[in-house]
Image (tube, helix red, strand yellow):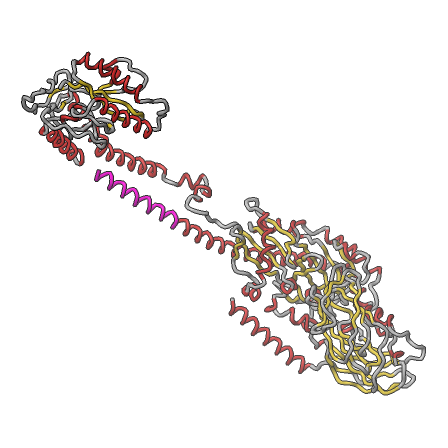
Amino acid sequence: MSTLWSRLSPRWGTGVCLSLLTLLVAPASADAAHVKGRLEGFRLLRNPVWAEANDSSNHGFSFREPVPTVRAEFRRPFPHIPKELCVALIAATPQPAPKPILIRVGGGRTSPVTIVVTPGTRLTFQNTDPFKHRLYGVDIKTFAAAEQGVGATRDWTPATPGVYEIRDEAAPSLRMWIVAEPNVASISYPSMKGEFAVNVEQAGEYTVQAFFAGKKVGDAVPVKVDAADVDLRAVIRVMDQKTADAEEKAADEKAAKATKATKGSK
Amino acid sequence: MLLSRFWYVVLGLLVGVATFLLFLATSMYNREGAHAMGEALSSDSQVVNWYLSNDARQRSAQLISFGVDADVARSLSKSSENDQKVPDEAREKALAALKKVSATIPADQAFDAVFAVDQHGRVVAHLGYEQASGNQDFELGGYPVVADALRGYIRDDTLVLDRIYRVVARPVEADTSQLPAGAIVGARILDDRFARELSARTGAAIAFYTAGARVSSGAPESFNSAQLDQIVSDFSSLESDEEYQAKGRSKIRTIAGMVGVQYSKLPGEAWKLGAGYAVAREPKAVAGPFGFFKTADDQDKANANVALAVAIALAAAIIGIGFSVLEHTRPIHNFRLEVLKLAKGESDQLQPSRFRGAFRKIASDLNDGVDKILAKGGGPRRGPADLQEVLGDLPAEPQMSAFSFPGENMPAAASGGSGPHTAPVITPKGLPTAPSNPRLPKPPPTRGAVNLDSTMEAQGDAPSSGSPATAAWGAEASEPAEWRAVYQDFVALKQQCGENTDGFTYEKFEATLKKNRDTLMTRHGAKRVKFSVYIKEGKAALKATPLKD
C-alpha cells in the first residue's frame, strides 16, 4: 500500500513544500490512479494562530486597520490551504509507514502545517530560515525543545495513533499538527482554489477526509478506485456559513471578554 | 554662668532640631525623588510605546509607495499565479521595483529591510536582508502580520528572528475583485542606532532586550549608559513580576539603588517571547544629610540664603562669646585684679561686693580663711630656707639641701622660760611666723613625727612646706643617738626615693653633720643644731635647724 504515496499532478498545483515532501515518499507508479475533487467553504475556516494573533487582548500588534479597497470577504484569517488543509485517502485497513517525509520549518510556519501519516512514519524537520528554531512537541516527551540551527534537520516519528502538536519556542506563530492515522493510504494538498488530486497506488475502497489544524473538517467521502482516475462529483464542504458565523461570533465574544478583563485589570 | 549654660542648651536644641530636620529632609527628598522617578519612568515608557506605535504607522504609510507601484503589483500577481515556484522574471522585476521605490523614501522613514511577498507567502524579492540571499524557498507567510496583510489589513508586529524587528505590512493589490496579489513588508531593526534615535526623540534612556539579554540601547548624554547593563542581572526576578506578566509593564524597579527601571513588553510576537524594552533613570537621592552638598548644583547654591545662614551663625557666635565674656572672662579679670591688689598689700581683703556669682562666694570664703589664720596668730614662714643659701657650698654627702630656723628678729627661746610669745613675728620675707614656745613640751623622738623643724617644735600644727620625714630628736636624746636616728631616716628616705646608698656610711654622715653643726653654731651662736630629713625635688635632703636654747 505504500505505493499509494506518490507525486501529485502539477496541474493540480500544490505548494512547493508538497513537492519536496513527495520527493521523499515512494515514486509514483505509471499506472497510479487519482482521486480528484474540490473543496468548498475553506475560506470560512479560521487559522487558529492568526485568529488568536488578531485578538487585540493578545497584544499581537499596536495597530491593525483594514484596507478599504480589499473586499470584506477576503478580510478573514482563512488558512493557506495548500499547506494547511490536508486531504487524506483513508483505506479500510492499516497501511505501512511510507518513507521519511520532509517537513520544512520556515517563514513562521511548517510546510505542511497539518499532515496525516501512518504511525511509525519518520518525519524530518529541516530549518530553512536564516536563524535558529527550537521545536518541541506539546506534551510529547520524545520531542523536547532543542535548538536547530540554519539548515539543520531533526527527526521524529509518531509511534502511536493520535494527534500531535508541534510548536516552536522561538516562533509562537509556528504550530503544526500531525495526525497519526493507521489507515491513511495517501495524502494531498489542494490548490488555492480548493482543487485536489490524491494518488492511489492500489485499487480498492477508500474514504476521502480533509484535515485542518489537526481535526477532521467536512464530511468523509467514500470512493471506490479502480484503474482509472476517479473524479468526485460532489464537492467537499469543509465549513458551512452557519457554523463559521457561530464560531466567529463565539470568538468575538471571547475576545471582547478578554479585552474587558484586561482593561479592568489596568 | 546661667546665661552661657542657657545658651549652650539653646544651641544644643537648635543643633538637634537642625539634624532632625536634615534627616527628615533627606528622607522626604529621597521619597519624592523615588516618586518622581517612578512617574518619569512611567512617562518614558508610555512615550516610547507611543513612539514605537506612531513610528510604525508613519512607516506603514511609506509602504503605500510600494503598494501602488505597478511593477511590484504585477510581479507579485505573476508569482501568486504560479503554485510551484516563484518565476525568475517576477523576482527580478520585483527587486528592481523595490530598489526604485526605496530610493524615494526619506531617510528618516526608510526601512532596514523590505520584502515583497506573494499570495503563497513566498518572498519574491527583498532588500536589506542579506541573510536570506540565495534562499529560493525563503518565505514569511506564516507570520500573522504577513498573513493579515495578504488578507487586506495594514498592521504592525515585532518579530524576534535573528534580531528584533519592528515590522509593518500592507497588501498589494493588482485586481480589487480578487485577493491581494501579495503584500509588502517593511522591517526596522531595533539596534543601537534605532535605540539612540528613539532616545534622542523621547529623552529616555532605553534598552531593548530579548531572551534575557540586552540587544541594544541608547541614552541621553546625561545618563550613564553603563547603567543599562545592569538590567541583565534583573531579568531573572522580572519573571516573577505579576504586573509585568499580566499587563506587559513592570512596576518601577530599582537595581542596586543605582538605577530605576521599568520594563515593557513589545507588542506583537515579541510579547510572547519576552522581548521588550526597558526605560531607565538614575534616582534622585542623597545618601545622607551631607549628600545635599554633593547633589546641589550652582543654581541650588545660588537659591540658598547664605547671608541669612551666615548672619544666624554670627549672631549665635556673638551671643555665645558675649555670654562667656560677661560670665567668665570679665569676672575672672576682676578677681585677678583684686587678688593682685591683695597680694601687693594695696588692700587688706577682697571686696565680695565687687564680684558676682561664684566669685563673690570665693572672695568671701578667702576673706574668712585669712581672718581665721590671723585669728590663730598667723602662719609659719612657708618653706624651709635653702641650706646652701645660708651655708654656702656644702659637702657632697650628705646633701644639706635646706634648713629653717627662727628668724633673725625672733628672740631666742628662753631657756628659763620667761612666758609664752604669742604675738606673731614677721620673718625677713614678710611671712608671719609663729612664735616659739619653749615651754611647750618637746615631742617624743618618734619616727612618725611630721616635721623635725624647730619651728614646728614651737608650732606643731602650723603648715609646713615639703614632706619632712621623721627623725628622732629632743633635748633628752644624746646627739650621737639623735644623729644615728637621723642617719637611719635619711638612708630610709634615700631608698624610698630610689637613690643609691652603697658606701654611704654613718661615719661619713656623722662627719658631715659635725662640720655643719660647728659652722652653724659659730655663725648663729646656737647652742646646738637639729637635723631632720625631708624630700626635696624627689631626693632625700637634710634640714639643719640651729637652736639657741
Residue B439 shows in this picture: yes
What is the quadrant of residue B450 in the picture? top left
Does residue B23 lie above or below A253 as drawn? above
Image quarter where the N terminus of chain B lies is: top left
Give the image location of residue A158, x and y in percent: 78, 76
Quarter of the rendering containing residue A93: bottom right
B130 lies left or right of A199? left
The segment highlighted magenta reads B1-24
- Residue nearest the observer in this picture, A139 or A71: A139
Q: How many marks?
A: 0
Q: Nearer the viewer, residue B141 or A134?
A: A134
Q: In the rendered structure, does residue B23 fall within the stretch colored magenta? A: yes
In the image, A262 versus B426, the foreground residue is B426
Horizontal side of A153 relative to A240 (left or right) equals right
Where residue A81 sits: x, y (%)? 76, 73
Q: Indicate left or right for B87 with B248 as reference.
A: right
Q: Is residue B149 visible?
A: no
Majority secondary structure in the magenta region: helix
Residue B522 placement (x, y as % from top left): 19, 12
Horizontal and vertical percent position of residue A159: 78, 77
**Of residues A72 and A117, the one drawn nearer to the viewer in this rendering:** A117
Q: Is residue B480 magenta?
A: no
Q: Residue at x 57, y 46 (%)?
A: B224
Q: Is residue B276 left or right of residue B328?
A: right
Q: Would you identify the image quadrant in which residue B529 lies?
A: top left
Taking the view exactly as shown, the residue that stands out farthest to the left is: B418
Q: On screen, B403 above or below A254?
A: above
Q: Quadrant of the C terminus of chain B?
A: top left
